[in-house]
Image: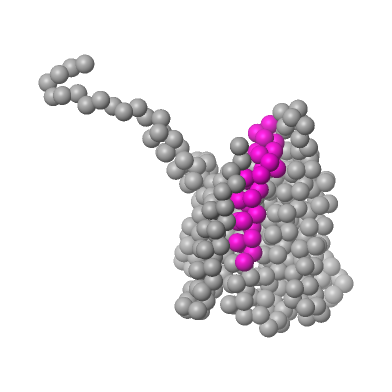
Amino acid sequence: MISRTPWPYALIVAVFGALAFTPLVASSFQLAFAIGCLNFMVLATAWGLFSGPTRYVSLASVVFFGIGSYTVAVLGEAMPWPAVLAMAALIGGAVALVVGLATLRLAGIYFVIFTFGLSEMVRQLVTWYEVNVTLSIGRYIFLDITQTQIFWQLLALLAVVLIGAVALQRSRLGFALRVIGGDETMARHFGLNPTFAKLALFVASSVIMSLAGAIMAPRWTYIDPAIAFNATLSFQVVIMALLGGMHRIWGPLLGALLMSFLFEALGSRFPQAFSLLLGLVFIVIVYLLPNGIVGRIEEAFARTRRAPDTPTVPAGERP
């Protein structure tokens, strides 16, 4: 039976309502770090929204993040800000629809390879267009949007994503997606349509990532394909989701929070070896935390509940 209790929604609204006051008390450095952390939380949660139930590992996060960023670079000064965000979501959703129709019949390593190749292909296409059509390598972004406004927009987006994720998990569609992730053949026998369900979730996840890229774009005064479509971002998102636990709503959120602190430490102290250290972190997570932190906590609680009460044997007596 699917639970309908409203307390998760009330909790999200209360927590995020309190967090909205952060810019009023935080320093400029703390606010900048909070913005980066929120960005990763949005991306990791959106990634887990699709990959968690379906178990498809996507490396295309940077594609949609970059699409959102470049939409702002091209249309930011020509349209009102809400219209720019709407266009970023529309373009990201349209690209995701085309990509999904072409690739979601793939599975396993083939899907992973395709999504990684897609990110590189898009970066090369945008680079070719900028060099040969616009005769430049990048674009400048001059928008009157403050850091505080970026923080509030990301916070609102994350709240909407979490509420949507909770609603999805507690819905019949969420149950259907979990069945599909376990065994698509069995899902078809139950009358489910795996292709439609995966496509709908892939598009929704991609739209969220595109909006995150659009909201973050005003932080940069200059953007080029190497910045907007940096493939490292996709691996960072995957690592965050895997660390927290991709099969639970709160897993990617927790992973993004913890890894944001780690990335900040590694990036400031070991900038030249950041990619190498990122790979080592990924290996450690895969071997030591295959189900993430949330999964490890759930396993510990499950063992505690299953463990029978052990009777105390008095000293000097043998059973």
Q: Quick one: which residue is furthest to the right in this view?
A: 133
In the displayed structure, 79 sits above or below 118; it is: below
Does the magenta segment cover residue 180? Answer: yes
The dominant secondary structure in magenta is helix
Of the 4 image quadrants, the one containing the N terminus is top right
Residue 153 location (% of width, % of height):
63, 70
Relative depth, front residue between 272 and 98: 98
Residue 125 location (% of width, % of height):
81, 62
Does the magenta segment cover residue 38? Answer: no
Residue 19 location (% of width, % of height):
51, 68
Q: At 47% from the left edge and 76% from the top edge, which residue is drawn?
A: 26
Left-right relation of 213 to 40? right
Q: At 51% from the left edge and 74% from the top edge, which residue is drawn?
A: 21
Image: magenta residue range: 156-183
Does residue 237 appear in this view?
no
Relative depth, front residue between 34 and 2: 2
Q: Quick one: which residue is furthest to the top in this view?
A: 319
Does residue 170 appear in this view?
yes
Left-right relation of 293 to 227? left
Of the 4 image quadrants, the one containing the C terminus is top left
Number of marks: 0
Q: In which quadrant of the rendered view does residue 132 lie?
A: bottom right
In the displayed structure, 139 sits above or below 158; it is: below
Q: At 13% from the left edge and 24% from the top edge, which residue is drawn?
A: 315
Q: Quick one: which residue is furthest to the left in this view?
A: 316
Q: At 65% from the left edge and 54% from the top edge, which residue is drawn?
A: 164
Residue 166 location (% of width, % of height):
61, 51
